[in-house]
Image (spheres, grey):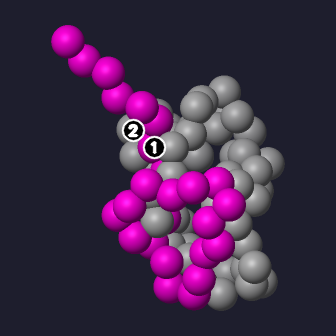
């Protein structure tokens, strides 16, 4: 399964990249992907990650499919 991972804002700084391609086996959940990413990029573990799949917020138990586009970002606040 091929996934395109896009990092935004602080997550891009933590990962040292704005975009990666990931090849992985099937039956990968959003929660498992988040764990795998924080293991690969430890600086991400200091952030509260939000994840969208194909431009929609994703539940932790959502199952990813081949070709999904994943956005990883943090909450944005302003005033």
Foreground mark, 2 or 1? 1
Measured as percent of width and height from the top left, residue 48 is found at 58, 32
Q: Residue at x 25, y 18 (%)?
A: 78
Front residue (pair 41, 25): 25
Q: In this view, does 19 lie above or below 72?
A: below
Q: Is residue 46 left or right of residue 10?
A: right
Q: What element carries label 2?
A: loop
**Part of the protein shown in magenta:** 54-79
Q: Is residue 71 above or below residue 27?
A: above
Q: Which quadrant: the N terminus?
A: bottom right
Q: Is residue 53 above or below residue 73?
A: below
Query: Looking at the image, can residue 71 be seen?
Result: no
Identify the residue under disc 2.
9
Q: Quadrant of residue 14?
A: top right
Measure how far apart labels 2 and 1 are at the Cα level. 7 Å
Q: Which quadrant: the C terminus?
A: top left
Q: Is residue 14 left or right of residue 45?
A: left
Q: Which residue is drawn at 40% across and 70% down?
A: 54
Mark toward the start of the polypeptide (2 vs 1): 2
Label 2 with label 1: CB-CB less than 8 Å: yes
What label does residue 73 carry, if any? 1
Front residue (pair 44, 67): 67
Q: Is mark 1 on a helix, strand or loop?
A: strand
């Amino acid at each position: 399964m091929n996934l395109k991972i896009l990092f935004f804002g602080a997550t891009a700084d933590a990962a040292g990249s704005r975009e990666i391609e990931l090849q992985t086996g099937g039956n990968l959940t959003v929660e498992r992907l988040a764990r795998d990413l924080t293991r690969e990029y430890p600086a991400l573990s200091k952030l509260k990650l939000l994840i969208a799949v194909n431009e929609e917020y994703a539940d932790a138990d959502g199952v990813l499919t081949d070709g999904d586009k994943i956005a990883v970002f943090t909450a944005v606040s302003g005033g």
